[in-house]
Structure formats: C-alpha cells, structure tokens
Amino acid sequence: MSASAIEQLAINGGTPVRDVKSRPWPQWPIWDERDVQAVNDVIRSGAWTGATQVNAFAQEFAQFHEARFGVCNASCTISLQSALRAAGVGMGDEVIVPPYTFIAVPTVVLLVNAVPVFADIDPDTHTLDPKAAEAAITPRTRAILVVHHAGCPADMDAFPELARKHNLALIEDCATAHTSAWRGRKVGAIGDMGGFSFNASKTMTAGEGGIIVTDNEEYYERCASIVNVGRLVPGAKYEHTLAGTNLRMTEFQAALLRVQLTRMPEQAARRWENGLFLNRELAKIPGIRPMKLDERVTGHSFRNYPFRFDAAQFGRMTRAEFTKALSAEGVPCGGGARPLYRDSLFRPQNTYAGTQMDYSKVYCPVAERAAEEEAVMLRQTQLLGTREDTQDIIDAVAKVQRAASR
C-alpha cells in the first residue's frame, strides 16, 4: 500500500491507524468467575436482604481510600445529596459548584432546596477554580461541592483552607476519582465527605451504586440514617430521628464490588502509566495540549483522558471535525458538554428555594471555551491496553494533525 493511501484520513477513504474490528479496545466491565461466584454465593445463602456484604464492602472501600467510615447507597447522586443534608445544607442556602461537569452536581443542590452558584474552572485542569469559588461566596453560602474532573484531583490544599476560612462544608464529588490522590492521600475524606459512583461507566462498577466516605463520625451517622429510612446508627429497627428513605445498596452489588475492588489497584496503575505516556507524547504534537498534572497529584484515575485541541494548529479544522476524524482512525472520542447553567433546567428568572436566580446572566469563560472549542475526551478503557495500544492514539492524533496542516 502506498504511503499516500496510508496518510489519507480514514474519514476520506484512507486506511485507519487502528482497525477496531480486528483489534478492539479493551472491553468494559472486566469480570471473571470470581464475580459470578460472589453473586451466586449471595443467591445460595438466601440472605438477599441485610447488610453482611454491604457492611464488609463499606469498610474495605473506606479503608482503601484512607477514610474512617463508609456508607453504601444507591448512587453517587444519592451520596452527594445525603452529604449536603448531613452537613445541614437546606432551604435558601447557596452551594458553589463548577459548571463543567455532570448535571447531578447542581441537581443535588436543588434536591435539598438550596441554590447552586456556578463558579468557573481552572483552564489547566478543568476542575473548580479556587479563586473563582472564593469570589462567588456570599453570606448565604453554606458549602462548596468540588468535582475531581475525569479523576483529576482539584486543588485540595486551596479548598480545605477556603472552607475553613469561611466556615463552609466541603463536599468532594469523587464519582470518577477512584484511587486518585493528592499529596499521597486518596481523595474522598480530605474534605468533610466524598461521594463515589459505581455506575457502569466508572472505573469500578456493579452497574449502579455509590458510597460516601468521611472521617467525621457525626456525618457518618447522619448519612447512614438518611439512606436507611432514618434509622439510628446503631439503633432499634423502628427508632428514627431523621426523615430518611430506602436508598440502600443491595447485597448483590456489594458482593460484586468486593471482587471488583481487588482489581482496581492494577487497573489504576495501568491507566496512570498510559496516561503519563500520553501526556508526554501528545504534547509533542502541534495544537494538542494535555491537561496539567500538578506535582501534588500523586494519583489520577484517568476515568477519561481529556486533552485540549487548538483549531489554529489544525488548519482551522473544528473540534467536531477533529473528533470525527480521530474516531474514524479507530480512536473513539468526544467533545465537552455545554456549561450546565445553559441547560433548560436553569432557564432565566427561575425561582429556587424562594430566590430569584437569573442564570442567563451567568458566564464562565473558561468553561465555555472548554465545552465549545477545546476539550476532547478519550475513554478510560483506551488506557487499559498495552503500550502499543496507547501508541495508536498518538499516531492517530499525529496523522490527523498532518492531514489538517496540509
């Protein structure tokens, strides 16, 4: 085959860098007979209710993430909502959130009758900017909900200091940050509470599920009560002090997650190694800027691998054209979601918790630029392969860049 045919973009009829039919990317989820046996054991035990597996997993996961307590529940959304309630956030309180994340982040604020206040993100990490967050603080601010974007820890020096300075609760959204660490400590209990997800797309999964971790015993007891119909911890079955509901994790999920937890260190190490390799090599390609990895970040889950795209270095190819061309080369990818304050949920002059909020006036320039022009995302499974697999990503990006430059 001629060099010109190889260099022609696959989207234009050329040969793709990677033929995904003959060389598919690693599949997800990863499981074996141990997972099947764990679920079968629960079935055969007849103990389909109760919390033997749930309590064991809560302890194991909390210990792995260097936290004193864990509270299993139905999802990370439930984790964050329960954490806000446990921290006393309620009617009319303001909670600072980033606009460049999943819709559940501002939604959980609404669900406790509080008001989400959007603050811009850091251009190098796409996590909440501490300076923008501080500028958004008012006398009504009660908490900061910081998101470890794509598994990259936010500035966990600045945010705990900011929370202490203004007497605010600090909640960590760790939905994508399993194994991520800041200065050698895993995220989750660096703030007051942290919520993790076990959704099917996450780096550890039982299809669905979530957990709250914390070092604070009072918060632990409140969260455990909220997700378990308001029962005391410990306490009699029909003794209640909080308005809770049934948000519990099942024994089947917990049994599966206990096996999944044993694989997580090796999988995380592989994504970390491949992520660092991509950072180094993609930075050599004109128009590609990997996200900054702060020297204080000692663990990054790379649930996604985000990088920034500069159209000026790609012959004015748009981001949408770039992702389409790269996907055709056998490297599936996508762009960023629009800032959440532009979602119809936050239509102008809406009333939240008795407060008129005109979100049409909110504008976060860094989030806008990331969402509309710059951000490109690879899947976590693409970082679970070999060095040869990772090299395919680099070769495909370089091929598209050369073609666009011509």
Image: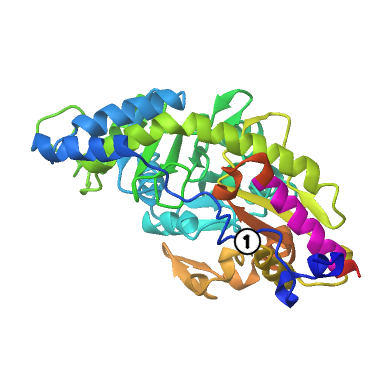
Q: Is 401 included in the stretch rendered in magenta?
A: yes
118 relative position to 394: left or right: left
Q: How many marks?
A: 1
- Vertical order, 148 against 286 (above or below): above
| Residue at (84% x, 58% y) in the render | 287
Residue at horizontal 57 percent and vertical 39 percent from the top: 301
Residue that appears at 73% across and 30% down: 295
**Horizontal side of residue 366 vs 52, given as left or right:** right
User: Quarter of the image containing the C terminus?
Assistant: bottom right
Mark 1 crowd level (few <14, some 14–19, many ≥20, 10 Å Cα)? some
Q: Is residue 231 magenta?
A: no
Kindly report the secondary structure that dominates the magenta region of the rendered protein: helix
Question: Quick check: 209 left or right of 166?
Answer: left
Q: Quadrant of residue 164?
A: top right
Which quarter of the picture shows residue 63? top left
Closest to the observer, 9 or 303: 9
Q: Is residue 241 among the parts visible in the rendering? A: no
Residue occupied by mark 1: 19
Whether residue 56 is visible: yes
Q: Quadrant of the N terminus?
A: bottom right
Q: Between residue 364 and residue 60, name the one nearer to us.
A: 60
For the record, the magenta segment spans 389-403
